[in-house]
Amino acid sequence: MSTPPPGTPLPPLAGGADGPAALRPLLSAVLDALHDGALARGGPLPPGGPDAVTERLRELTLPVLPDTGTGAEEALRTLVRALAHGAADPADPLCVAHLHTPPLAVAAAADLAASVLNPSMDSWDQAPAASALEAQVTRTLAAEVYPHAPAPDALVTTGGTESNQLALLLARERHGPVQLVHGANAHHSLPRAAWLLGLPEPVAVPAPAGVIDLAALDAALTDLHHPLLVAATAGTTDTGRIDPLPAIADLCARHHAELHIDASYGGPLLFSDAHRSRLDGLDRAQSVTIDLHKLGWQPVAAGLLAVPATTCLTPVGHQADYLNADDDTEAGLPDLLGRSLRTTRRPDILKTAATLRALGRQGLADLVDRTCAAARHLADLIEKTPGLELHDRPTISTVLFRPTGATDDDIAAIRRTLLTQGRAVLGRARADGRLWLKATVLNPHTTPGDLETLLSLLPLPAPTPLPEGSSHR
Ligand SMILES: *Cc1c(COP(=O)(O)O)cnc(C)c1O
């Protein structure tokens, strides 16, 4: 039978004045399933590794497309519970592998409204208030990056990867085929964007201490042919280091090179009085990437590309008669198509707007400061723990460490064992020619006790016995 029996009600819609009443019981099922799934998991990720997770999911969720549907509440209960049970949950303080943020409740709740209203940001007649909100919020955030610019602006993106691509595209449109010069510490999306845009093969400048080597950058800029675009990083993915931005901006000025700064990770330090000065020089860049789904506690996606003036975005302008006909634009309908390379686009700004308003600058600064303090505390604990070696004090909230005497293979095995046991989600990063365990602390709720628990899970080398007759320390 290919159609439901007569009399079966149509599935309700989410929007309109009646939508909320239809949603309420479903949301209740979703919230219960999230709660039950997280309790059943009982840790930062499900134990057993990929085979066990896939098998459990199969058992719970097949068939994907039954002939007769199970109904909304059952479907939500089953799937949401299975997904929560099988999640690597960044709200668990022992889930610290990546720049994988625990979203704030206020942001997730706002995201529900975005799904219900479903504005699409490609034309004003699909998103009247949402487009006005996006304009307000992007200008406000861009002014945090460029406080002295007359008309700073920002595009909303899916994240650092898209922002970096747009930055290279804008540079190419200004100057033709720019030569990208980036640190060896830069994110892989930068050279990939150069490849995507058909730009010359990028040049990677060494970053032996985790940040761009200035003498090597100077030499590269002296040798290379123009046009040149330097990409610096404020918060590297591996170690959280910040390139020396003012010195790099000076070199770019001297060599007539443009500067893009990838502050995907470090950008939100701008909210904090205690940490803002680490980003000095940020506003000397032609464009700045910021990701609020990292140190901004937003659900994915929440990327931005900030520029000092709206006119910098002109190259992305585009016209399609059904979305922004010239006569509509002349009659005063805002022309939104030039705000992205995408067409249909979610109002991702709503969750960010709700977060900014709910927490205010002080609330955000407090989250930034707590997160950085938790990372410093983790570094303190590692320094105090015999048998553990700390790579370096954290610049933002990334901490690299390893049991003393461990080989690179040991490090990789420790990480996979903890994953398979479902006890901790640690990352890995190569620095100074060695592999390290990486904790990227993003959870502002992390307590000292959580960090002690994390370290207690590591297999420490047996202490070397004191030689016969030596006195105890
Ligand atoms: C995470 C990250 C990116 C990529 O951002 P996505 O949001 O994953 O696309 C780019 N640059 C840096 C420095 C990052 O940390």
Image: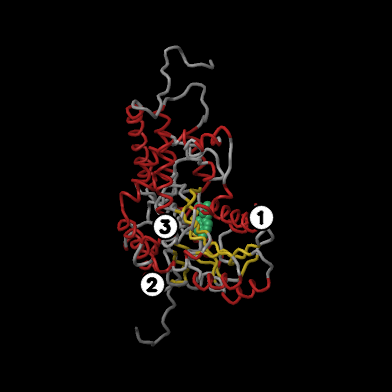
Residue 258 in the image: state x and y as whole percent.
58, 64
Q: Earlier in the sequence, mark 3 or mark 2?
A: 3
Q: Nearer the viewer, residue 127 or 458?
A: 127
Q: Earlier in the sequence, mark 2 or mark 1?
A: 1
The image quadrant that residue 119 belongs to is top left
Q: Residue at x 32, y 49 (%)?
A: 357
Which label number is shown at residue 129? none
The kind of residue tagged 1 is Trp
The kind of residue tagged 3 is Ala
Which label number is shown at residue 385? 2
- Is there CB contact under 8 Å for labels 1 and 3? no
Mark 2 vs mark 1, CA separation in Å: 45 Å
Residue beneath disc 1: 195
Q: Residue at x 52, y 30 (%)?
A: 64
Few, some or many C-alpha atoms within 10 Å of disc 3 (few <14, some 14-19, many ≥20)?
many
Instruction: Check the image and report above or below for 34 versus 237.
Output: above
Q: Residue at x 31, y 60 (%)?
A: 366
Q: Nearer the viewer, residue 160 or 324?
A: 324
Which label number is shown at residue 143? 3
